[in-house]
């Protein structure tokens, strides 16, 4: 963007040089590679078009042809103020005189897009230019500390740690340093909140009370028990849904294919294509069906989800365990959900913790877990459960040793058998998941799933704000003691 007469003259000079360069390329000798000539000309023409666009905008502003400078967010404000100054026929020196500032100070403000300007300074510039703005574009934040801001958001169901790790701009210190510009941090975070939740600036940092439009995430179908912290669950569900929409945007070439409904078909397809069944090969198989698999690592809220949007599917895996067998079980569990109601272009399902009564009593959840169990246990899930029950006389304290012994004898994975046993016991309101995890080797399933995603995504398909939101969600998990 051209901000003053000096930049205008420089830009016009650059445009003339690019025009000369294009003429030289067009006169290239016939022996020159035509593809190289074409690429060079198109690159120069693109850059010349950008320069002409900046020149034309500046000239329109100077002539007064622009009577209204619109701004919808704080991020658009710096450029809008510069345009308003030029359209008002004011130089940087003229504006400085109105504000009792030196011309160099105005130049510094505009050169940095007002990064160091306080709210009171921005308000003074707005008034000096006679700009009319929506009330929520400029919200006073000089008395709103970062801690107060985080506490405010926590009251709406957004955990402080979650906000700092996922919604703060990447360059923000955590916790913010004393010298950090509080206003800039809050405004950048508010931009992320607007992108995810649709909140205005006033709703994020002002006094207005924001609302969660959970219906947009298909959550009207979710059965959320009253004992669950609804606000927190709603907040995270919308966040995960937004990331899922981005997952589809950055994987535009995925082609949806029919999803097999029989465990034996899935197991046979993976064995034929990849030779063995593992988390890595199962991910390749699911991606091959045109389903994006997005791993998240935030604690609480829910354990997984599936969304189908305009006929395309996204599986969200969200486990804290480092057991690859458990992630494999969950992936196949969600694959069963992905195959339900294939003719419906829109579908959603949220996975509450395994110990939740509503999940235990759900017929759909039972079918999904039995499907996953039969894929990983070669169709023998119930048969192996009965063997364990017989050899232990149904006494749960004996299960741990017996599961390992039966798995070794029958040639199946002890970790996978343990997961299925834990599921079966959960139907009897027995929580055996902790013991099951002790039978499972520890690995790095989140990184495996994350890398499978990164291998297939193109971040250039989304804007910068969404790019940062998605990349922050995919950052390496923090090491735990």
Image (cartoon, rainbow, N blue to C red):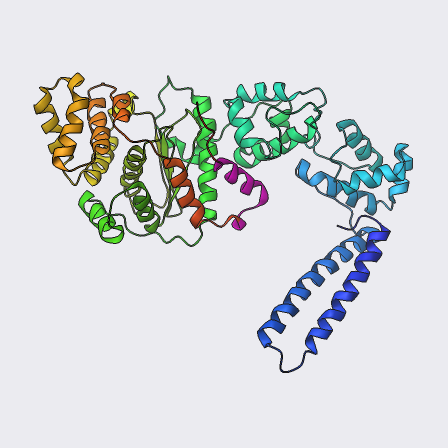
Determine which quarter of the picture holds residue 300: top left
- Compared to residue 24, the image places residue 230 above or below, namely above
Position of residue 95 measured from the top left corner of the image (x, y, whole percent): 87, 39
Q: How many marks?
A: 0
Part of the protein shown in magenta: 460-475
Q: Is residue 463 magenta?
A: yes
- Quarter placement of the C terminus: top left
| Front residue of 447 and 47 | 447
- Compared to residue 85, the image places residue 478 above or below, namely above
Q: Is residue 168 magenta?
A: no
Determine which quarter of the picture holds residue 267: top left
Q: Main secondary structure of the magenta part?
A: helix
Position of residue 23 measured from the top left corner of the image (x, y, whole percent): 73, 74
Q: Residue at x 27, y 30 (%)?
A: 440
Determine which quarter of the picture holds residue 428: top left
Q: Residue at x 58, y 40 (%)?
A: 465
| Front residue of 36 and 303 | 36
Q: Is residue 243 left or right of residue 95?
A: left
Q: Is residue 410 left or right of residue 454?
A: left
Q: Is residue 48 left or right of residue 245?
A: right
Q: Is residue 202 left or right of residue 409?
A: right
Kindly tell me whether residue 64 is visible in this rendering.
Answer: no
| Front residue of 3 and 372 | 372
Position of residue 381 measured from the top left corner of the image (x, y, whole percent): 16, 34
Kindly tell me whether residue 261 is visible in this rendering.
Answer: yes
Position of residue 224 measured from the top left corner of the image (x, y, whole percent): 36, 24
């Amino acid at each position: 963007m051209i901000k003053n007469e000096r930049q205008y003259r420089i830009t016009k000079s650059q445009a003339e040089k690019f025009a000369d360069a294009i003429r030289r390329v067009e006169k290239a000798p016939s022996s020159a590679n035509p593809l190289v000539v074409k690429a060079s000309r198109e690159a120069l023409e693109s850059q010349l078009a950008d320069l002409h666009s900046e020149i034309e905008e500046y000239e329109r502003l100077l002539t007064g042809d622009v009577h209204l400078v619109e701004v919808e967010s704080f991020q658009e404000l710096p450029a809008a103020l510069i345009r308003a100054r030029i359209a008002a026929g004011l130089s940087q020196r003229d504006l400085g005189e109105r504000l009792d500032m030196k011309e160099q100070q105005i130049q510094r403000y505009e050169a940095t897009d007002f990064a160091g300007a306080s709210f009171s300074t921005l308000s003074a510039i707005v008034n000096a230019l006679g700009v009319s703005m929506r009330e929520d574009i400029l919200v006073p934040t000089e008395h709103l500390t970062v801690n107060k801001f985080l506490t405010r958001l926590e009251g709406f169901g957004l955990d402080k740690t979650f906000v700092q790790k996922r919604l703060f701009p990447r360059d923000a210190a955590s916790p913010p340093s004393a010298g950090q510009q509080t206003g800039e941090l809050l405004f950048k975070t508010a931009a992320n909140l607007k992108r995810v939740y649709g909140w205005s600036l006033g709703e994020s940092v002002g006094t207005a009370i924001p609302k969660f439009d959970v219906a947009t995430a298909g959550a009207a179908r979710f059965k959320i028990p009253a004992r669950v912290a609804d606000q927190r669950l709603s907040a995270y569900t919308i966040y995960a849904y937004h990331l899922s929409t981005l997952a589809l945007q950055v994987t535009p070439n995925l082609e949806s294919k029919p999803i097999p409904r029989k465990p034996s078909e899935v197991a046979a397809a993976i064995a034929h294509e990849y030779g063995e069944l593992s988390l890595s090969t199962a991910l390749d198989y699911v991606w091959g069906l045109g389903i994006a698999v997005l791993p998240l690592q935030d604690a609480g809220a829910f354990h997984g989800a599936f969304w189908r949007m305009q006929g395309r599917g996204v599986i969200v895996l969200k486990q804290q365990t480092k057991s690859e067998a458990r992630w494999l079980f969950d992936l196949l569990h969600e694959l069963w959900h992905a195959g339900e109601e294939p003719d419906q272009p829109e579908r959603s399902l949220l996975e509450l913790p395994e110990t939740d009564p509503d999940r235990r009593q759900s017929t759909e959840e039972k079918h999904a877990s039995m499907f996953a169990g039969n894929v990983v246990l070669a169709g023998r899930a119930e048969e192996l459960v009965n063997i364990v029950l017989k050899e232990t006389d149904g006494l749960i304290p004996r299960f741990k040793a017996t599961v390992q012994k039966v798995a070794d004898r029958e040639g199946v994975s002890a970790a996978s058998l343990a997961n299925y046993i834990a599921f079966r016991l959960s139907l009897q309101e027995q929580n055996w998941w902790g013991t099951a995890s002790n039978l499972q080797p520890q690995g790095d399933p989140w990184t495996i799933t994350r890398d499978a995603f990164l291998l297939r995504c193109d971040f250039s398909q989304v804007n910068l704000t969404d790019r940062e939101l998605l990349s922050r969600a995919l950052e390496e998990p923090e090491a735990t003691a």
